């Protein structure tokens, strides 16, 4: 069993599924609200590792969908400032185990990192894209 710090958007369908996978694998979750956390550039930046800035963003955030924010056109400093001011822009979930911090829910990456009990029907699911956006 691993203790996981899990930052989510409360009510997010995929975050609910992701938490269920982690709990079914026997992990203990400390769930936090991504939107109300007192983020700073310094506390947020480590979650992104060496990913390009464009992959830090929640593609279903209203500002991204409306193209008010275009992740591909942002530098690191600007992206962090926007996310600290408006956490809905942050791709989720944010996951921390010990000192290691990750963003998103790549099933294979998480399985090799902390272990998941994979089931074939679960592996085929998109656990990052909000299912509500498929109806719009």
Image (cartoon, grey):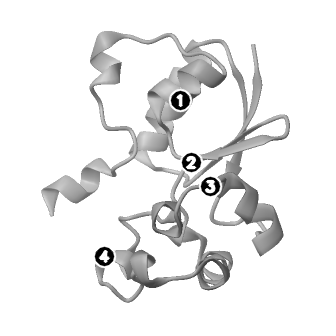
- Looking at the rendered structure, the secondary structure element under dot 1 is helix
Q: Which residue is mark 1?
A: 109
Say whether residue 41 is left or right of residue 83.
right
**Are there few (<14), some (14-19), or many (20+) residues within 10 Å of tag 1?**
few
Question: Does label 2 or label 3 sit earlier along the sequence?
Answer: 3
**Picture residue at 18% right of the left edge, 54% below the top:** 134
How many numbered callouts? Answer: 4
Location of residue 27 by image quarter: top right
Q: Is residue 81 above or below residue 22?
A: below
Indicate the quadrant containing the C terminus: top left, top right, bottom left or bottom right: bottom left
Viewer-side label of 4, 1: 1
Distance from the alpha carbon under mark 4 to that under mark 1: 27 Å
Q: Which residue is mark 2?
A: 93
Distance from the alpha carbon under mark 3 to that under mark 4: 24 Å
- Looking at the rendered structure, the secondary structure element under dot 3 is loop
Distance from the alpha carbon under mark 3 to that under mark 1: 15 Å
Distance from the alpha carbon under mark 2 to that under mark 4: 19 Å
Distance from the alpha carbon under mark 2 to that under mark 1: 14 Å
Q: Which residue is mark 4?
A: 65
Q: Are marks 4 and 1 in contact (CB under 8 Å)?
A: no
Q: Which residue is mark 3?
A: 50
Q: Are marks 3 and 4 in contact (CB under 8 Å)?
A: no
């Amino acid at each position: 069993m691993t203790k996981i710090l899990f930052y989510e958007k409360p009510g997010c369908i995929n975050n609910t599924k992701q938490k269920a996978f982690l709990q079914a694998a026997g992990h203990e979750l400390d769930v936090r609200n991504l939107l109300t956390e007192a983020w700073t550039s310094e506390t947020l930046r480590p979650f992104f590792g060496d990913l390009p800035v464009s992959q830090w963003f929640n593609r279903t955030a209203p500002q991204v969908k409306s193209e008010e924010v275009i992740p591909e056109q942002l530098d690191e400093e600007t992206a962090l400032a926007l996310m600290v001011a408006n956490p809905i822009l942050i791709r989720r979930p944010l996951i921390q185990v010990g000192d290691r911090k990750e963003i998103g829910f790549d099933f294979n990456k998480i399985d090799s990192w902390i272990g998941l009990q994979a089931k074939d029907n679960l592996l085929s699911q998109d656990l990052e894209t909000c299912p509500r956006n498929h109806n719009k």
